[in-house]
Image (cartoon, rainbow, N blue to C red):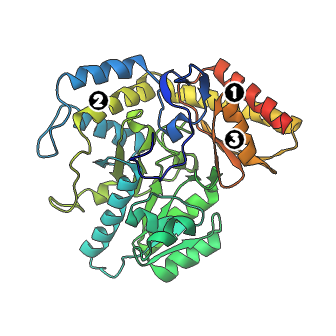
């Protein structure tokens, strides 16, 4: 099937053809329980009836108009994102990497406008992942992603996660345009930054005139049971980047900025042909309405509590589990050994997960997952880990 496709992915052999909620079916008819959700994307699961109806309706009306013209859904999506995030205004993108690119450009333009054109660098956190475009890649810590494509954007450096002293020293010494961090580092193995660290980042950015960017592409949009993962520390960034679940499976991202940054970009400074079109905005409205008015945020919190309680029970039973990470429906199971084997055997047993940070099984189920499906997933996990 890949004769004319660039070999950039190591795909499983199975071909998925249909799904319902948190279950997905391959071409042979085998059913899988989806604890990965398209890597944190399929928040409403598969074949969600409300999403299906909205997209069918929109395809029959208009799919694309470009950003030279208006369509009916832009402002409602933007208003909901501003309200939920506690920030002010939105630039729509097609992905998380594009949202991060927009954030970097806003940071540089802000300092240039303020009379500090020398402030062009960026500080990020060791273990962070921000995307694969050249700008976002420049902030991504793991050298295996960066090295093949260097030289990248100059002036990027990293500090250790949760090291407050190192962070404060770097911000005061380097005076970057922005500090970019993930409150929960998904690709590093669902590693949370501490509340102390997040608060120190906000405090020191304020003291040094540095913009604070929270990359919540994976951990945001309600996945922790709060709209933003950083909300648990009562920290508001100057910019937050969102994507993955925001349009429930369609490609969409958002760069959301505080009031003081609303006028930084002027017409012609930045743009996107496809971003924020009527089809993806219609999907985003279905998701955001479910989140705000349909009880979906509370459901995530409840299922996350159930999942953590079940994992804690497994940890007491199975010494192979060395650590539990994350919250809500972004959780990780760190294994003392054999994580690659575990992920493969879970897949064979009908539970879709993946492995990050070397030794962590990452769990990112759809927000609509049921209590019974959480319990069934925990049973499969127990059986596989006991066998290992």
56 up-or-down from 9: above or below: above
Residue at the disc numbered 2? 282
Q: Marks 1 and 3: which is nearer the front?
A: 3
Q: Which sits earlier in the primary sequence, circle 1 or circle 3?
A: 3
| Residue 55 image offset from top left, x and y in percent | 30, 24
Q: Which residue is mark 1?
A: 377
Residue drawn at x 60%, y 36% as measured from the top left: 329
Q: CA distance from mark 3 to mark 2?
A: 35 Å
Q: In this rendering, which labeled residue sits more in front, label 1 or label 2?
A: 1
Residue 380 x %, y %: 74, 28
The reply to whether residue 145 is in sight is: yes
Q: Mark 3: few, some, or many residues within 10 Å (few <14, many ≥20)?
A: many
Looking at the rendered structure, which numbered label has been put on residue 388? none
Q: CA distance from mark 1 to mark 2?
A: 32 Å
Q: Is 265 drawn above or below residue 337 in the view shown?
A: below
Question: At which x and y percent is residue 375?
Answer: 71, 23
Determine whether label 3 and label 2 are within 8 Å by CB: no
* Number of marks in picture: 3
Mark before the other along the chain sequence, 1 or 2: 2
Quadrant where the N terminus is found in the figure: top left
Q: At x 38% / y 47%, what residue is drawn?
A: 4
How much space separates mark 1 and mark 3, taking CA atoms?
Answer: 13 Å
Which residue is at the front of the view, 42 or 261? 42
Element assignment for label 1: helix
The quadrant of the picture occupied by the C terminus is top right
Of label 3 and label 2, which has the lower sequence position? 2
Residue appearing at x 48%, y 39% in the figure: 227
Where does label 3 land, which residue?
343
Which secondary structure, mark 3? helix
Q: Residue at x 17, y 29 (%)?
A: 62
Question: Crowdedness of circle 2 by 10 Å Cα count: few (<14), some, many (20+)?
Answer: many
């Amino acid at each position: 099937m890949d004769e004319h496709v660039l070999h950039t992915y190591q795909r499983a052999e199975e071909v998925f053809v249909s799904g319902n909620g948190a279950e997905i079916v391959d071409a042979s008819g085998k059913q899988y329980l989806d604890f990965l959700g398209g890597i944190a994307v399929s928040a409403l699961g598969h074949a969600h009836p409300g999403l299906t109806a909205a997209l069918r309706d929109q395809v029959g009306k208009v799919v694309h108009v470009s950003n030279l013209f208006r369509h009916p859904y832009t402002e409602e999506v933007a208003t909901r994102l501003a309200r939920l995030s506690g920030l002010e205004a939105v630039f729509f993108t097609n992905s998380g990497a594009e949202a991060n690119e927009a954030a970097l450009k806003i940071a540089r333009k802000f300092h240039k406008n303020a009379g500090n054109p020398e402030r062009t660098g960026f500080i990020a956190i060791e273990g962070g992942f921000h995307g694969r475009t050249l700008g976002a890649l420049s902030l991504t810590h793991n050298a295996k992603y960066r090295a093949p494509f260097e030289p990248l954007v100059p002036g990027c450096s990293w500090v250790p996660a949760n090291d407050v002293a190192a962070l404060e020293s770097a911000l005061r010494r380097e005076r970057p345009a922005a500090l970019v961090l993930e409150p929960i580092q998904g690709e590093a193995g669902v590693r949370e930054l501490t509340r102390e660290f997040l608060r120190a980042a906000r405090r020191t950015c304020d003291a040094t005139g540095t913009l604070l960017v929270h990359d919540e592409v994976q951990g945001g949009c309600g996945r922790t049971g709060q709209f933003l993962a950083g909300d648990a520390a009562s920290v508001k960034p100057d910019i937050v980047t969102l994507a993955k679940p925001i349009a429930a499976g369609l490609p969409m991202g958002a760069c959301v900025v505080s009031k003081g940054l609303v006028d930084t970009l002027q017409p012609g400074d930045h743009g996107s042909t496809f971003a924020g079109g009527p089809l993806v905005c219609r999907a985003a409205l279905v998701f955001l309405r479910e989140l705000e008015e349909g009880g979906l945020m509370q459901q995530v919190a409840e299922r996350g509590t159930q999942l953590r309680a079940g994992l804690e029970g497994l940890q007491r039973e199975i010494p192979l589990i060395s650590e539990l990470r994350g919250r809500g429906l972004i959780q990780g199971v760190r294994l003392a050994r054999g994580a690659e084997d575990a992920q493969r055997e879970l897949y064979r047993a009908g539970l879709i997960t993946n492995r990050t940070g070397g030794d962590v099984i990452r769990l990112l189920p759809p927000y609509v997952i049921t209590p019974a499906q959480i319990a069934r997933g925990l049973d499969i996990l127990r059986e596989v880990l006991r066998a290992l």
